[in-house]
Image: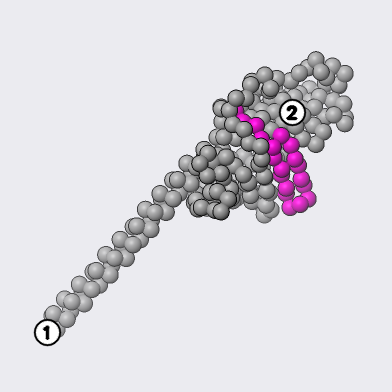
Amino acid sequence: MRKEIKSAWLMRVMVLLFTLHYSLFTISAQDNANARQAKRVFNTAWNHIYGKEGVRFHYKIDILHLYKEEGTSWNKGDKAKSEYKGSKMWNDGNVKYILREKKGIVEIHDPKVNKKDEKLQMFKFEPDSYNYSIAKDPEGLLVTLEAKPGVKVKMKKIIALLNQGNYYPKKLRIKVSIFWATITFSDFQAGNIDDNIFVFPKEKYTNYKIVDER
């Protein structure tokens, strides 16, 4: 009798352990699938902004309501153009020109060296440094990235609201150090971006002082 009770008890324990193991395995598999989907979706959105197909969009940046910037950007691979706060920038991949209208100067920079552009360094993205998750949102898809323990990145957390279907970005909330920055996108156009738009039109600014900072 005691042997039968003991055997039944062991059987229940084994069934419980198997069920627990299967549940944990299932949850882990679901988490891994969610993470893979989230990383794929976010990388697609990121490539829309910086990929070779080219893109144009209007943006608003808000950092703690203390720093605000609004403008329009064009990107295509290593080329870029932007217009914001009385300034314009052209980067053809080899040389970057920054027009400071109020100062009446045109700065020339090496686009591979961002000495003065701390914002670019602040928002430098390293895709393998994060844990990813994705969830549905009433306005689209919500992808969350959290920096892996021990990695050294300035962006500690990213919450991206994306359009469902094409994954165009609508809003990014980024935690840099201890503060949050919000970037809102609108008028998003992907593709059909002419390379000539990234070439600095020297003939229009012959009366500006040239400052070479390379």
Q: Quadrant of residue 109?
A: top right
Q: Image height check: is 3 above or below 41?
A: below
Magenta residues, dominant SS class: strand
Q: Is residue 68 located in the magenta-colored stretch of the structure?
A: yes
Residue bearing the label numbered 1:
1
In the displayed orientation, state which residue is furthest to the top: 203
- Would you say 77 lies left or right of 40 here? right
Residue drawn 35% across the image and 61% down it: 24
Dot placed on the residue nearer the N-terminal end, 1 or 2: 1
First to last magenta residue range: 54-72
The numbered dot on residue 30 is: none
Label 2 amino acid?
Met
Q: x, y percentage for residue 179?
A: 69, 53
SS for callout 1: loop
Q: Is residue 41 or residue 63 the one in the foreground?
A: 41
Q: x, y percentage for residue 207?
A: 88, 18
Label 1 amino acid?
Met
The alpha-carbon separation of the residues under discs 1 and 2 comes to: 87 Å
Q: x, y percentage for residue 197?
A: 69, 22
Residue drawn 59% across the image and 45% down it: 153
Q: Is residue 208 visible?
A: yes
Residue drawn 81% across the image and 18% down it: 204
Please identify the quadrant where the N terminus is shown. Answer: bottom left
Q: Is residue 151 located in the magenta-colored stretch of the structure?
A: no
Q: Image height check: is 110 above or below 72?
A: above
- Would you say 191 lies left or right of 211 here? left
In the displayed orientation, state which residue is furthest to the bottom: 1
Q: Is residue 60 or residue 17 the one in the foreground?
A: 60
Instruction: Name the colouring of the figure.
Output: one colour
Please identify the quadrant where the C terminus is shown. Answer: top right
Residue bearing the label numbered 2:
89
